[in-house]
Image (cartoon, grey):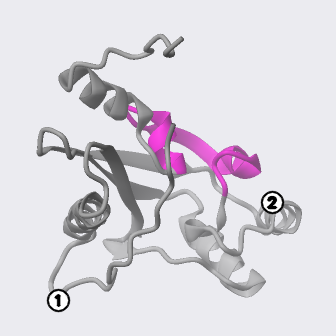
Amino acid sequence: NFEQVAPDIDETPLSRETPREMVERLSLAKGQEIAKNHPNAIIIASDQTAVFNELPIGKPHSIENAIKQLSDFSGQCITFYTGLVVINTSTQQTYQTMDITKVHFRALSEAVIRNYIDIEQPLKCAGSFKSEGLGITLFKRIESNDPNALIGLPLIELTDIFYQMGYPLPLQPNR
C-alpha cells in the first residue's frame, strides 16, 4: 500500500545555486517534509529540472514559446537532473542519488516542430515535449543509466536503494 503526498515546500532557487544543487536540495527537502508526519514508512521523494545552455528550462505555456524552445533545441543537447531521496523513517536512514540524462535532439524543421506541438500539445511540459509520447521522435539519442528518470523517477536507482535497505525487488506480496 502507498500514499501519494505533495509536500508544502518553497521551491524557489537559492541565490547562486546551480540547477543540480537545487534538485539535490529540493528532493531531500520534500522527503524530509513528508517524513515528519509518516513514522514507520519508506518515503520516496524526487525532484527534476532540465537545463539548456546552463539555464533551467521551464514550461512553455503557449504555442509560440513551445516553438521557440524546440527550435532552440534543434540539433542540440539538454540535460535533465533527477534527484531521488528515500527515507526509511523506521531506521532514520536516508539514501540520496542523482540521475543525469542527456537528450540529444535531431535537426528539427519548422514543420516537424509544429506538427509535434499540434498533436501532443506539450504546453505544460518542461522543454515542450513528452518523452513517453511522440516526443521520442524528436530525439537523436538519449544518454542515461535509467530511461525512467527522464519521465521523473529513476526506477533502476530506486531498486538499488531498496536492495541496500534489505528489500530485494520484486518482493512476494503478503498472502
Q: Is residue 125 left or right of residue 170?
A: right
Q: Is residue 14 left or right of residue 64?
A: left
Q: Which residues are magenta?
A: 130-151
Residue 70 covered by magenta stretch: no
Above or below for 147 versus 9: above
Which disc is residue 15 wearing?
1
Question: Considering the image in quadrants, where does the C terminus appear?
Answer: top right
Disc 1 versus disc 2: nearer the observer: 1
**Horizontal and vertical percent position of residue 144:** 40, 36
Residue at 81% from the left image edge and 61% from the top image edge: 120
Residue 134 covered by magenta stretch: yes
**Horizontal and vertical percent position of residue 83:** 30, 53
**Horizontal and vertical percent position of residue 106:** 62, 50
Looking at the image, the residue that sits furthest to the bottom is 15
> Which secondary structure, mark 2?
helix
Say which amino acid is labelled 1. Answer: Ser
Residue at 20% from the left image edge and 85% from the top image edge: 14
**Horizontal and vertical percent position of residue 63:** 76, 82
Residue at 30% from the left image edge and 62% from the top image edge: 37
Which residue is nearer to you in this view: 117 or 27? 27
- Mark 2 closeness class: few <14, some 14–19, many ≥20 residues within 10 Å: some
The part of the image, by quadrant, that contains residue 21 is bottom left
Say which amino acid is labelled 2. Answer: Val
Name the residue carrying label 2: 112
Which residue is nearer to you in this view: 39 or 75? 39
Above or below for 160 versus 25: above
Looking at the image, the residue that sits furthest to the front is 175
Which residue is nearer to you in this view: 157 or 1? 1
Which disc is residue 137 wearing?
none
Which residue is nearer to you in this view: 52 or 11? 11
Q: Is residue 19 left or right of residue 129?
A: left
Q: Is residue 27 left or right of residue 175?
A: left
